[in-house]
Amino acid sequence: MVEDDTLILAAVTKGLVERGHVVLSASTGLGALGEIVDQRPDVVVLDLGLPDIDGLELLRMLRAVSAVPVIVATARDDEQEIIRTLDAGADEYVVKPYSAAQLDARIRAVLRRVRTDDGDEPVQIGGLTIDTRSRVATIDGQRLDLSRKEFDLLWHLASRRGEVVSKRELLAAVWRQPYGGPEKTVDVHLSWLRTKLGESAKAPRYLRSVRGVGVMLADPDSR
Ligand code: CA
């Protein structure tokens, strides 16, 4: 819960806890950003009216580093504002004042969608199989000998397969550095991962770099 109104926070937290949720809270936008990256909640409920930063701005910053589902709490039933919010990357919205029961229903709906899209099933991309439960990746049936970071990097790219992922997002997701850091770290690990996948930057197969934007994992045979 990202909410600066302590009365709303207390009431909603109580209602959510009664319904079986574990609730962490932040009362500022920038505080929330760090908490979200560190604590990796299943879902974020974001109040748009925060003391330090515009909620929509925060949502855009959050989207640069995390794909966590976001339910926006908006003060007015204003169609334009709701559209802007959804365009900025929110998954759902509730209009204030809302009850804990309504929010709980929205949370369950969002989590159902996320879990059907992206369960813990092994991911298959061309000849590459990545199983996050056993932390084993294979290519054409051969097991890849990956370090922990290499596996996490491969898994994050696989969860966003077919999309260009920025190095900044990778630093946040794999190295937990939400405010940026040495992109060289990402480059070095990408290069090791490439070698293990039997490819190179000059002759890419699964891993394709997009200069100045990031890197994408995709089936080499489906381009
Ligand atoms: Ca507020």
Image: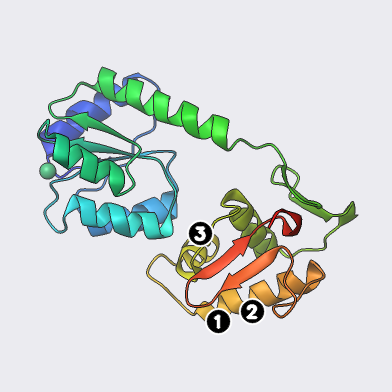
x and y percentages locating residue 111 in the rendered image: 45, 30
Secondary structure beneath label 1? helix
Secondary structure beneath label 2? helix
Question: Which residue does the image show at 71% across and 62% down from the upper left?
Answer: 206
- The label on residue 184 is 1
| Residue 14: quadrant of the picture | top left
Looking at the image, residue 63 sits to the left or right of residue 203; the answer is: left
User: Is 18 rendered above or below residue 151?
Assistant: above
Asked if residue 215 can be seen in this view, the reply is yes
Q: Earlier in the sequence, mark 3 or mark 1?
A: 3
Q: Tell me the crowding category of disc 1: few under 14, some 14 to 19, or many 20 or more residues within 10 angstroms, Cα based.
A: few
> Which of the pair 80/188 is nearer the observer?
80
Question: Which residue does the image show at 49% across and 80% down from the upper left?
Answer: 182
Q: Quadrant of ligand 1?
A: top left
Amino acid on which the number 1 mark rests in the picture: Lys
The N terminus: image quadrant? top left
Amino acid on which the number 2 mark rests in the picture: Val
Q: CA distance from mark 1 to mark 2?
A: 6 Å
Amino acid on which the number 3 mark rests in the picture: Ala
Badge 1 vs badge 2, beta-carbon distance below 8 Å: yes
Badge 2 vs badge 3, beta-carbon distance below 8 Å: no
The residue indicated by pointer 2 is: 188
> Which of the pair 204/160 is nearer the observer?
204
The residue indicated by pointer 3 is: 173
x and y percentages locating residue 188 in the rendered image: 64, 79
x and y percentages locating residue 94 in the rendered image: 22, 29
Q: CA distance from mark 2 to mark 3?
A: 16 Å
The C terminus: image quadrant? bottom right
Looking at the image, residue 218 sits to the left or right of residue 143; the answer is: left
